[in-house]
Image (cartoon, rainbow, N blue to C red):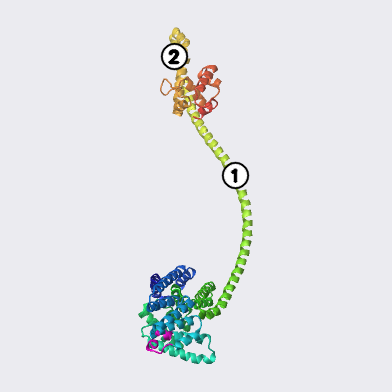
């Protein structure tokens, strides 16, 4: 019982915080968040049911431990109120057990309280005439006449008879009875109590004074928020007032508040959820209305609340038909959607086939372009290399043409000086000296000077030749000239190769060596090469 009460207190606090902004929310027609809360409760209220069952187990344990009629009477009362809005047949059972104990006790007040519990249970099971008879057989004492519970039962039973069993001729009779009972309820309640306010609002609503009823209920909520936090009857009454005023959004909000309170209190005999379902169905929210009316029917059936079955049975066909219509529309929409999707799928498939074919062609074209690009790249590289060689050739030609002119000029000058010298000696009759000059060979000196100039020009054109050439040879077999900035015979042969003169005969003629000597030098260098022999000459030409 304590655990269930704690849950109820927590629920009341949440509801109080929600209803604090109710006025503004209703005015702004903002009920979506509140309906989402109710959706969650309707979809999964197992923890609420479990707390209720645990609370009943604790109350039954207290009944089993009760000693004496007084304690048992109180424990039976607790069991009755546990089942009063949860399991109505069980509530009637414990009410009658309570009547038995009260008769043994001999207390008129206890008997009156127990009999009112019995009438309450009969009302819930739809046995209105029997419940009214029990109330009329109560002891006529002060306790009954001052009991709010008594007049509540008289009013609710009479209202049920009026709504469900009266004919047109009896309407006036029952309406007068209801008015009298409301007056009686107001008489036994203080004007700051919810029972007083609710009944007065009902009277105002019945008289067509809807604005006054709304003002009364709103003022009470503002001054006594704790009095409405867990009072589903208050919210249902306020919803009815809004309905009369034509404010459907506010009506929906109030019925939603009442339904949340009923569901969180584990009430099975409510009317709020089915009223809300009917309102939602009228607005076109048929799926939610179907869920709510189905939940209401399950709760009423589970609670055996026969007095509510007739009302729900009137709502069910309307909502079920609307829900079935919506489902049919959804199925039709689904079929249309499937057909459209199928057509789109076919179109998409054909587009994909075309795209795949086009992509295949593009892939082939891209491959062909890549191959051509590679060919162009190779040609580019060859062109760069050719340009490089051409630039080098031009540079070599320029250097060696200038060198050729210089050598020729020097030789001409030397020959002129030699002629002048001979002419002077002839005039002087120096025949012996002339013979000596003519008999002495000039070739060695000329070649040395020629090679020196060749080396200087070549190393100016290729300053890293010696270093790069030695990289092509095996370690330890490098060729190092004796003099700095000069070449030896072996390097001079490959210098000519680097200049593009690869024929050994031409090299021999140029250097005044025999072809065999040139061949031997070249073969010796190839044998010491660190690179493949067949590529040695090509790599020298690329230095």
Identify the residue at image location x=58%, y=72%.
Answer: 326
Q: Which residues are magenta?
A: 138-152
Residue 411 at what x, y percent from top left?
Answer: 47, 20
Secondary structure character of the magenta stretch overall: helix
User: In this view of the protein, which residue sits in the foreground, 409 or 492?
Assistant: 492
Q: Quadrant of residue 13?
A: bottom left
Residue 406 at what x, y percent from top left?
Answer: 46, 24
User: In this view of the protein, which residue sits in the foreground, 63 or 153?
Assistant: 63
What residue would you read off at disc 2? 421
Does the stretch in magenta take in 132?
A: no
Asked if one can make out residue 428 in the rendered structure from this viewpoint, the answer is: yes
Quadrant of image for the N terminus? bottom left
Residue 467 at what x, y percent from top left?
Answer: 44, 27
Asked if one can make out residue 197 in the rendered structure from this viewpoint, the answer is: no
Q: Quadrant of residue 26?
A: bottom left
What residue would you read off at disc 1? 367
Residue 182 at what x, y percent from top left?
Answer: 43, 88
Q: Is residue 298 left or right of residue 152?
A: right
Q: Is residue 354 left or right of residue 305?
A: right
User: In this view of the protein, which residue sits in the foreground, 352 or 117?
Assistant: 117
Real-space Cα distance between discs 1 and 2? 78 Å
Helix, strand or loop at disc 1? helix
Q: Is residue 284 above or below residue 498?
A: below
């Amino acid at each position: 019982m304590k655990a269930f009460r704690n849950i109820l207190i927590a629920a009341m606090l949440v509801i109080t915080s929600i209803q604090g902004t109710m006025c503004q929310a209703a005015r702004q027609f903002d009920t979506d968040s509140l309906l989402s809360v109710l959706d969650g409760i309707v979809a999964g209220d197992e923890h609420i049911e479990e707390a209720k069952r645990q609370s009943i187990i604790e109350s039954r344990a207290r009944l089993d431990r009760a000693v004496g009629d007084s304690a048992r009477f109180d424990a039976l009362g607790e069991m009755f109120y546990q089942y009063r809005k949860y399991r109505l047949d069980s509530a009637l059972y414990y009410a009658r057990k309570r009547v038995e104990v009260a008769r043994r006790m001999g207390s008129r007040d206890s008997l009156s309280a127990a009999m009112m519990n019995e009438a309450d249970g009969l009302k819930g099971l739809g046995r209105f005439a029997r419940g009214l008879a029990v109330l009329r057989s109560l002891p006529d004492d002060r306790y009954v006449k001052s009991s709010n519970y008594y007049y509540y039962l008289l009013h609710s039973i009479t209202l049920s008879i009026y709504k469900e069993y009266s004919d047109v001729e009896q309407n006036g009779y029952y309406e007068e009875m209801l008015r009298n009972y409301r007056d009686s309820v107001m008489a036994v309640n203080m004007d700051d109590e919810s029972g007083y306010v609710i009944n007065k609002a009902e009277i105002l609503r019945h008289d067509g004074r809807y604005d006054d009823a709304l003002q009364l209920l709103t003022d009470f909520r503002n001054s006594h928020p704790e009095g409405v936090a867990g009072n589903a009857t208050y919210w249902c009454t306020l919803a009815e007032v809004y309905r009369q005023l034509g404010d459907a959004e506010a009506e929906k909000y109030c019925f939603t508040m009442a339904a949340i309170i009923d569901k969180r209190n584990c009430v099975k005999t409510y009317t709020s959820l089915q009223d809300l379902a009917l309102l939602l169905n009228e607005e076109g929210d048929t799926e939610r209305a179907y869920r709510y009316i189905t939940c209401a029917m399950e709760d009423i059936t589970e609670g055996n609340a026969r007095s509510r079955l007739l009302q729900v049975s009137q709502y069910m066909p309307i909502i079920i038909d609307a829900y079935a219509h919506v489902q049919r529309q959804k199925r039709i929409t689904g079929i249309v959607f499937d057909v459209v999707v199928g057509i789109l799928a076919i179109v998409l498939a054909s587009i994909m086939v075309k795209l795949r074919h086009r992509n295949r062609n593009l892939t082939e074209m891209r491959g062909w372009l890549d191959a051509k690009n590679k060919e162009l790249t190779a040609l580019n590289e060859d062109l760069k290399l050719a340009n490089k060689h051409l630039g080098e050739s031009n540079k070599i030609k320029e250097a060696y043409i200038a060198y050729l002119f210089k050598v020729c000029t020097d030789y001409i000058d030397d020959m002129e000086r030699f002629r002048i010298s001979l002419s002077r000696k002839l005039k002087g009759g120096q025949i012996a000296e002339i013979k000596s000059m003519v008999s002495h060979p000039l070739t060695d000196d000329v070649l040395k000077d020629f090679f020196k100039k060749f080396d200087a020009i070549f190393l100016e054109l290729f300053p890293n030749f010696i270093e790069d050439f030695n990289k092509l040879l095996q370690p330890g077999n490098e060729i190092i000239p004796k003099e700095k900035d000069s070449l030896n015979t072996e390097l001079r042969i490959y210098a000519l190769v680097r200049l593009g003169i690869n024929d050994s005969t031409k090299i021999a003629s140029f250097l005044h060596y025999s072809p065999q000597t040139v061949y031997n030098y070249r073969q010796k260098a190839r044998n010491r090469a660190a690179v493949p022999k067949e590529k040695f000459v090509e790599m020298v030409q690329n230095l």
